[in-house]
Image (cartoon, rainbow, N blue to C red):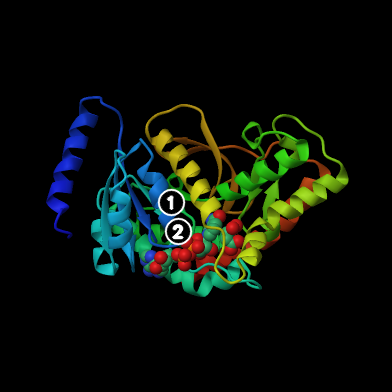
Amino acid sequence: HPPNFQMEESFSLRRENCRAKGAGPGFKVAILGAAGGIGQPLSMLMKMNPLVSVLHLYDVVNTPGVTADISHMDTGAVVRSFLGQKQLEDALSGVDLVIIPAGVPRKPGMTRDDLFNINAGIVRTLCEGIAKCCPRAIVNLISNPVNSTVPIAAEVFKKAGTYDPKRLLGVTMLDVVRANTFVAEVLGLDPRQVDVPVVGGHAGVTILPLLSQVKPPSTFTPQETDYLTARIQNGGTEVVEAKAGAGSATLSMAYAAVKFADACLRGLNGDQGVIECAFVDSQVTELPFFASKVRLGRNGAEEIFPLGPLNEYERAGLEKAKKELAESIQKGVSFIKK
Ligand code: NAD
Ligand code: LMR
């Protein structure tokens, strides 16, 4: 441990005491992949979150530097560094929420599924650690391909006997963030006033924006519907191409991840009416996993909402989405089962 570990330990105990005295809640959060393109801004933004009392930053490289840097921010959370596989268990010990942006990103010309071979193994190892050290933690899984890594995580937890479907959430928030932005542009509104449900999964045609359910209620021409659907489905590729080999979305993803993690923490805290879209174990369709609106509570995704009425365009999109999703889910499941 770094030399100031004991002092930090006593700070975190002090904060625990504050919490016990009713001075406000505080949760222990671990970020796995904290030194990466998403990990760094995500760690910074979580350090600013008043619901976080202790922040564990884990990666296989560079966490001491990122931690030293972020720990100087005069916000409430205590930050600790964990470097390399040997420190994974310490990083996970006693945490309430684990956020996972570990893994390689796309380069131009790649699909998210092209990341499977490397990221599947990374996610398996990290989830084995979670099953052992913090089986009751809420897990926010960002590593791609999300449509396969969430089933991988579920299978790891099932094998370990710790699987609680409510506590495993694939992060699709960036699709909602993009949809809100692009729809607001078309409607001439402030994106903060717009709410677009995005269901299905997190890759190409599996990303299904439900434009018929946009709030405030709005209508779109067929051209606008085509434009918006394509732009939302290709938002990730738009960034990958613009970055021209230097990776994929990191800053907007960190923003989206924090928006989602904050919703999970408010749920853990007992706040009422916290609803966001996520890719979860689901009975909304015949597929075992599907993204839709979920209500977040003390136990994670406590309620999963049905899709609601779809128009003909969306029903056709749903069929396409389900076909690709079924294959991606199966690929993740067989990676652990075989
Ligand atoms: P990056 O390469 O910048 O960072 C990844 C980090 O993971 C690196 O610091 C690396 O050291 C770390 N890492 C690698 N193996 C690890 C292991 N075994 N344990 C812990 N950490 C490990 O990549 P990035 O841009 O931050 O993207 C990370 C992942 O997030 C990619 O798979 C990307 O496709 C995905 N992503 C998902 C979404 C989404 O909406 N869900 C959005 C953007 C990116
Ligand atoms: C995104 O949607 O930005 C991420 O899934 C990263 C990518 O590869 O597109």
Labels 2 & 1 near each other (Cβ < 8 A): yes
Q: Secondary structure at mark 1?
A: helix
Pointer 1: residues within 10 angstroms few (<14), some, or many (20+)? many
Question: At x 50% / y 58%, what residue is drawn?
Answer: 150
Q: Is residue 291 above or below residue 125?
A: above
In the foreground, 262 or 336: 262
Mark 2 sits near ligand 1, with its Cβ under 8 Å away:
yes
Q: Identify the mark at residue 42; answer none if there is no mark.
A: 1
Please name whichever residue, 319 or 18, is drawn nearer the observer in this view of the structure.
Answer: 18
Where does residue 144 sit, x and y in percent of width and height?
A: 53, 63
Q: Residue furthest top?
A: 22
Residue type (three-letter) at the residue carrying disc 1:
Leu
Q: Is residue 56 left or right of residue 220?
A: left
Residue 192 in the image: x percent, y percent? 62, 34
39 with respect to 72 (left or right): right
Residue 193 image-quadrant placement: top right
Looking at the image, which residue is at 66% across and 73% down?
109
Q: How far is disc 2 from disc 1 in space, using C-alphas?
A: 9 Å
According to the picture, the residue beneath numbered tag 2 turns out to be 101
Q: Amino acid at mark 2?
A: Pro
SS category of the residue bearing label 2: loop
Q: What is the x, y in percent for residue 98? A: 37, 51
